[in-house]
Image (cartoon, rainbow, N blue to C red):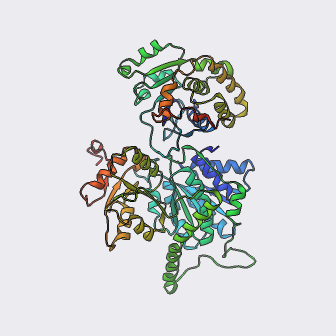
């Protein structure tokens, strides 16, 4: 029987299976249940780990950084304002090449204050140098969390596991947790080549002058590109043990003769998938689930979109004054290819607005319509654009 | 895919009820999903929680807008438009109330018009007070829903309760469930529930119980 677990609880169990030595976190909706469950596992002696309650997200990230640098597997979780408060530390973690795993329970960013789901928080940290993996279900959240530790430690890069706040974190689904033996087999004990050790002192994070800074940034960039293959390998290795893969860097499904593609990130994938099942009268379309936003899988994307005439990139965030963030990256990846499809940039589901089953019709209508040039917000309610607000 | 919405007040065990129902569904060999109304919850304020049950994996992650069933933990909430909003025509409305069907329909007034809802009132609070010593009607209502629909074997619901309820509360809640079983007409919502569960296909109606322990 599958285990009926709330998303947050499932993630907490996945973290526990990875045997972290230190978890440091500050509660923020909708991440709270994750760290509550971890704290409870520690309090109940079901997880041998030091749980550090800190006074801010800045400290949570800092404690996790320090623990990982001192040779201990570490984890933290946050969302929205919490992620932004961590921002300075997150760039440091990446630049110091600290292997660390963090869950981002994706939530809108203030102002206006809003506790519900979208992807603006993680998108804002897109350039922090972290690997970013997006999960489409609670099962993927479990599997990706465990994979993230192996990836982080193998590559010496931090991994942010993005899980839709509420939509996944607060939803109970039947999931399968790997056994402790399976995880122990998959994930060797934590090692970090540059562990801080008072018996063999070394410095992490020294100032780097112009003569080496560029090269260190270049090396980081190269490591991120190399992570593309590692994400595929680790997903395959995990599937070898558990029978479940999460889609590597991206996953495509749909009929071979489809001329339309719809690319999305996160839990909306399942809704679009069901929408497609129920709207058989509409033209065939491929669904592209982008799992890795960083590193950005340009080559895999070119292959996935080959032969398509129209691709809708559906996002839960945008860059004010510039439009769809992922859409722009998709355009860049395809620029100069011989048969570039038309890219339609669409935004939906900001600040927790529900993306219903019928979104599929809207998305397909966009794909079949004229090029709009700019990013379209598909679920805008014109009546709500009242005087004084907009 | 069958959809249920549960209405109650913050602190009444509304989310617990949704999670229990989904857990029981999974224990009974079905696929299930449950989630609360997303947002901040205040004790006493009207709240809702949602459940999906299906014979196939559920990939949808959207709100429940047109439930087949609505379960109401506090009958005063019947007065709110949102309590019956979107309930499908011919859908089932289960109310924690000693009142009979005609009385409940009268309370719904014009909202009933043309909707043909199948309404049942069950004395869930009375049973809860009797066995638990306080008013937590959620397990009594779930037992009534399980009996009316025939979607869940009693064993599946008991398995879910054993896994999710605090040990001190379990025995009395199991008694509530058993007592409720004799108070409703078993199978009165069988066709409605199974039609929804199997997407209108009648072929595999009994396979859902294959995994019941």
Residue located 52% across and 67% down the image: A130
The image quarter in which residue A256 lies: bottom left
The quarter of the picture where the N terminus of chain A appears is top right
Residue A252 percent across, percent down from the top left: 45, 59
Tell how many labels: 0
- For the point 44% across and 62% down, the residue is A124
Question: Which residue is outermost to the bottom?
Answer: A211
Q: Is residue B45 visible?
A: no
Residue A218 picture location, percent across and down: 49, 80
Is residue A137 at all visible to an observer of this figure?
A: yes
Q: Nearer the viewer, residue B91 or A81?
A: B91
Q: Is residue A162 left or right of residue B28?
A: left
Where is B47 relative to A197, above or below?
A: above
Judging depth in this view, the residue of B161 and B211 nearest the camera is B211
Measuring from the top left, give residue A232's x and y in whole percent: 54, 67
| A225 relative to B50, above or below | below
Residue in the foreground of this view, choosing between B122 and B9: B122
Relative horizontal placement of residue B150, taking residue B192 as reference (left or right): right
Q: Residue furthest left?
A: A370
> Which residue shows up at 70% across the image and 66% down it?
A188
Q: Position of residue A43 (x, y in %)?
A: 72, 49
Q: Horizontally, is B3 left or right of B22 in the view?
A: left
- Which residue occupies the foreground of this view, A312 or B191? B191
Farthest residue to the front: give it: B203
């Amino acid at each position: 029987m599958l285990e009926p677990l709330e998303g947050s609880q499932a993630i907490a169990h996945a973290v526990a299976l990875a045997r972290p030595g230190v978890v440091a976190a500050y509660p923020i909706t909708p991440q709270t249940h994750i760290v509550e469950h971890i704290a409870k596992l520690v309090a109940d002696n079901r997880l041998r780990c030091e749980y550090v309650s800190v006074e801010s997200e800045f400290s949570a990230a800092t404690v996790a950084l320090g623990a990982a640098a001192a040779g201990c597997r570490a984890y933290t979780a946050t969302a929205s304002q919490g992620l932004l408060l961590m921002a300075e530390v997150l760039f440091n973690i990446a630049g110091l090449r600290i292997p660390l795993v963090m869950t981002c329970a994706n939530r809108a960013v203030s102002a206006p204050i809003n506790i519900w789901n979208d992807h603006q928080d993680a998108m804002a940290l897109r350039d922090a140098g972290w690997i970013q993996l997006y999960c489409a279900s609670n099962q993927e959240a479990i599997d990706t969390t465990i994979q993230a530790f192996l990836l982080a430690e193998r590559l010496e890069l931090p991994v942010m596991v993005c899980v839709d706040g509420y939509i996944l974190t607060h939803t109970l689904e039947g999931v399968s947790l790997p056994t402790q033996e399976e995880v122990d087999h998959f994930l060797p004990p934590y090692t970090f080549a540059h562990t801080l050790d008072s018996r063999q002192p070394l410095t992490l994070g020294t100032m780097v002058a112009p003569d080496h800074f560029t090269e260190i940034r270049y090396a980081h960039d190269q490591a991120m590109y190399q992570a593309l293959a590692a994400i595929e390998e680790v997903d395959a290795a995990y599937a070898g043990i558990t029978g479940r893969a999460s889609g590597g860097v991206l996953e495509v499904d749909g009929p071979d003769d489809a001329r339309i593609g719809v690319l999305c990130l996160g839990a909306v994938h399942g809704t679009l998938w069901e929408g497609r099942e129920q709207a058989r009268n509409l033209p065939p379309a491929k669904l592209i689930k982008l799992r890795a936003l960083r590193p950005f899988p340009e080559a895999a994307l070119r292959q996935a979109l080959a032969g398509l005439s129209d691709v809708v990139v559906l996002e839960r965030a945008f860059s004010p004054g510039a439009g769809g963030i992922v859409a722009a990256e998709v355009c860049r990846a395809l620029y100069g290819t011989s048969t570039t499809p038309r890219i339609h940039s669409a935004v939906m589901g900001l600040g927790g607005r529900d993306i219903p089953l019928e979104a599929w019709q809207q998305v397909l209508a966009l794909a079949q319509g004229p090029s709009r040039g700019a990013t379209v917000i598909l679920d805008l309610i014109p009546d709500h654009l009242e005087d004084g607000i907009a | 895919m069958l959809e249920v919405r549960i209405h109650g007040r913050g602190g009444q065990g509304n989310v617990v009820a949704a999670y229990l129902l989904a857990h029981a569904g999974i224990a009974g060999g079905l696929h299930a999903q449950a989630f609360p109304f997303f947002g901040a919850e205040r004790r006493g304020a009207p709240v809702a929680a949602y459940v999906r049950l299906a014979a196939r994996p559920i990939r949808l992650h959207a709100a429940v807008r047109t439930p087949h069933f609505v379960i109401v933990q506090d009958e005063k909430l019947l007065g709110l438009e949102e309590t019956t909003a979107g309930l499908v025509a011919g859908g089932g409305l289960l109310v924690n109330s000693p009142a009979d069907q005609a009385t409940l329909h009268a309370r719904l007034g014009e909202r009933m018009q043309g909707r043909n809802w199948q309404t049942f009132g069950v004395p869930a609070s009375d049973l809860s007070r009797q066995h638990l010593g306080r008013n937590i009607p959620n397990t009594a209502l779930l037992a009534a829903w399980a009996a009316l629909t025939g979607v869940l074997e009693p064993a599946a619901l008991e398995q879910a309760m054993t896994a999710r309820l605090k040990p001190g509360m379990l025995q009395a809640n199991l008694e509530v469930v058993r007592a409720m079983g004799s108070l409703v007409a078993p199978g009165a919502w069988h066709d409605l529930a199974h039609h929804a569960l199997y997407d209108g296909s009648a072929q595999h109606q009994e396979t859902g119980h294959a995994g019941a322990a």
